[in-house]
Image (cartoon, rainbow, N blue to C red):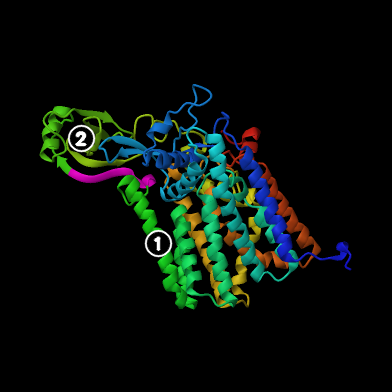
Amino acid sequence: MNDPQTIEMRPGAVYAVLVVIALSIVSGRIATVTSREGDTPFLSANDRSRWCTIAALVENGTYEIDPFLNRQGIKQNRRPWATIDLVRHQGSDGKQHYYSSKPPLLPTIYAGVYWCVSRTLGMWLSDEPIYVGRIILWLVNVPTLLVFLICTIGAIDRVARSTWAKYFLAASTCFGTMLLPFSISLNNHLPAAASTAVALYIFVRSIDTPTGGWWWLLAGLAGGFTAANELPALSMTVFWAGLLLLVQRRGLPGYCAGVLVVAAAFFATNWIAHHSLRPPYTHRGDGPLITTVEQFSPSAEQLRPILVSHSLATETSKIEIAPSRKPERMRVIVDGKKLYGLIRHSDHASFELRQWDDWYDYPSSYWVDGKRRGVDVGEPSRLIYAANMTLGHYGIFSLTAIWLLVPFGFFECFAKRPLLHRLLLASIAAATLVCAVFYVLRPEIDRNYGGVSVCFRWMLWFAPLWLFASVASVQRLSERPWGRWLSISLLAASVFSVSTSLDGPWQSPWLYRFWVFLGWIEP
């Protein structure tokens, strides 16, 4: 009979232990997650925006979230459902309503989970937010995290040669990325990372295993769903298709079919919710031109015949003209519900009358009335923004040190590896560069590091790809004692950042808070 102390654990058993520990940590945090007020499991305006949509869909059958915004909690002066991540536009009843600014596909899926929970327990989320909210959160986040862990570890296990490298990267997957803190709150980053991991695993599997059409359909669904949750991830969705076109064309039809299914669902939910194919956060400008008015002094009475001639008002309509967030633009309000934009030309004598399309411009809007503060103001310097998003207080490398292994792993593209493997690493490198440049080149208002969160969250979906790209560098380091200790040190630094964030992802990074303490930056 074997001595238990001499039995060597198989990699699968080690992976199982690591995964169970990670899921247990997240489950424990979800079981106790509570807002600052103590009456909901909602941790920020970001997740409250989605929770409002979920509740509105199941309880009211609509995407309009007006009834939830002013709900009072334990403290009468607090509104535990209120959010700044919302837009306002005309609804199907012709009146102005508030909606979440988030794309509606993901909340619609989660609303299906809530519908099942409410029918099983006989409880409403709005009545029992702590109890029902935590159940929903566990049902959607823990399985999603499990998918991310299993698929990422599975992809790494197929290409890593040394046992040490496999175990190190499995531990990094479970405990070294900021996806663990994001698993205790409702967000789009965890499902985006999980779907990326699914596509990655299928592509890596196809290197040495015949892969049928259903696998590629699943890869297409995963690639499309990643882009539906992280719009810049569309670059990787295209790269996946490019890889198939170059080396496995028989899988391209199934992959494209999967992407099209997700695209149809994405645009359909947008249309149902907002009567627009564009996501709500893209409505931040002026709408189509209605007419141009020469030699016009803006007043309600002078504007009335123009509106009447275009069937936008009647002779008895109440017409109001009010300022907007742009000095050259005024709001035209007809009968208290229809909005139009009146834009003054540089000559101050002619105006354009346009459809209203700035859904963020409404009274008391956080994004309009000068209420933004801290990182939400936006970084004026692109150079400083790039430095802080990589090595600074929101740094990809400074907060998650294991990502320092990624650039060296990209050199694996030139090693003697299967063609698909080399092309895959090249695609990951290209997508990383494309997305990084995209965020640096955004307008100043969008250069806010992803708002108040524990990391530069907009690139979290790269986690499975970067872990996979690190295989070569970890294997090289594992061959020498100093290399192993260096790898362990990088993982320890990453776990440190994760541990500072386990009470919630919607707070400033520990490095940002430390710099504020030192007086290097102002909060």
Q: Residue 86, position in %: x, y?
A: 40, 38
Q: Nearer the viewer, residue 401 or 25?
A: 25
Q: Is residue 68 above or below residue 457?
A: above
Nearer the viewer's eye, disc 1 or disc 2? 1
Q: Residue 439, position in %: x, y?
A: 47, 51
Q: Is residue 391 above or below residue 204?
A: above
Q: Nearer the viewer, residue 486 or 311?
A: 311
For label 1, the residue is: 261
Q: Is residue 243 above or below residue 489?
A: below
On residue 163, which mark appears? Answer: none
The amino acid on which the numbered mark 2 sits, given as a three-letter code, is His
The quadrant the N terminus occupies is bottom right
Quarter of the image where one finds residue 259: bottom left
Q: Are marks 1 and 2 in contact (CB under 8 Å)?
A: no
Q: Is residue 108 magenta?
A: no
Q: Residue at x 57, y 66 (%)?
A: 201
Q: Earlier in the sequence, mark 1 or mark 2?
A: 1
227 left or right, relative to 300: right
Q: Nearer the viewer, residue 485 or 386?
A: 485
Q: Residue 463, position in %: x, y?
A: 58, 57
For label 2, the residue is: 348
Q: Which residues are magenta?
A: 280-290
Q: Main secondary structure of the magenta part?
A: strand
| Label 1 secondary element | helix
Q: Residue 327, position in %: x, y?
A: 30, 33
320 left or right, relative to 24: left
The amino acid on which the numbered mark 1 sits, given as a three-letter code, is Val
Quarter of the image where one finds residue 238: bottom left
